[in-house]
Amino acid sequence: DTGVSQDPRHKITKRGQNVTFRCDPISEHNRLYWYRQTLGQGPEFLTYFQNEAQLEKSRLLSDRFSAERPKGSFSTLEIQRTEQGDSAMYLCASSPGGRNFPLREQFFGPGTRLTVL
Amino acid sequence: AQTVTQSQPEMSVQEAETVTLSCTYDTSENNYYLFWYKQPPSRQMILVIRQEAYKQQNATENRFSVNFQKAAKSFSLKISDSQLGDTAMYFCAFRPGGGADGLTFGKGTHLIIQP
């Protein structure tokens, strides 16, 4: 299957620990997005990459959140010093880019559910 | 900043009925894209239908169609001949036509199809 994959699917951690999530996009997609979804809400946009360049990061929730996509393929989202309020589903999506794809439809992965105790 | 409003937290209809989910949005952009996503229980988000704002014709995908009213900033989703598998959360999403790529989502409508 060549869909978007995320790892791990579930993560339980203690407050104050650091966590890192991985996203593998659809192989031919050059754009990759991170969202956070809390219970009963729609996804909230965090950041996105075009190839290895992070083009938008002002929406990251605090300086404890950071994302990388070093080789323009997979991406990681790290949360440092986790807090209970960080408990949520973290979604990754990818899309094609360029003039041939103006819609840039985003395809989502299954998400990583984070629980901070 | 754009906002997306879905005013129906939950809807329930009988199988085979037609149901319409509402979505309104607020933007000062003239060029943008609108999407409906489906999120089944414990499963990943799936794109249902999309609409380019510059196209007057309403998008249709099999049993799913939209009623796009640009002046009213309204983008409703109609599901015809509803099926049990349509039970899910439905999210309306907006993306401006310029460089910013992040989607703005509504809070969602929980649609329940009753047998």
Image (spheres, coloured by chain):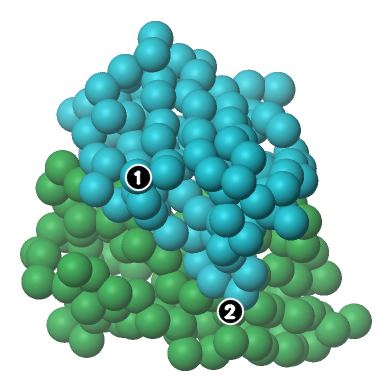
Chain colours: A cyan, B green
Q: Position of residue B109 (x, y in %)?
A: 58, 79
Residue type at tag 2 = Thr
Q: Secondary structure at mark 2?
A: strand
Q: Residue furthest front?
A: A16
The residue under label 1 is A63
Left or right: A109 in relation to B59: right
Residue type at tag 1 = Asp
Q: Residue furthest top?
A: A71
Q: CA distance from mark 2 to mark 1?
A: 32 Å
Q: Chain of mark 1?
A: A
Residue placed most toward the observer, A31 or A20: A20
Q: Residue visible at 42% across and 44% down?
A: A64
Q: Nearer the viewer, mark 2 or mark 1?
A: 1
The residue under label 2 is B109
> Which quadrant, please, contains the C terminus of chain A?
bottom right
Residue placed most toward the observer, B24 or A53: A53
Q: Position of residue A78 (x, y in %)?
A: 50, 34
**Quadrant of res B13:** bottom right
Crowding at dot 2, Cα within 10 Å, few <14 / some 14-19 / many 20+, comes out as: many
Q: Position of residue B27 (x, y in %)?
A: 17, 72
Left or right: A78 in relation to B70: right
Crowding at dot 1, Cα within 10 Å, few <14 / some 14-19 / many 20+, comes out as: few
Q: Secondary structure at mark 1?
A: loop
Left or right: A91 in relation to B55: right
Q: Residue visible at 59% across and 36% down?
A: A18
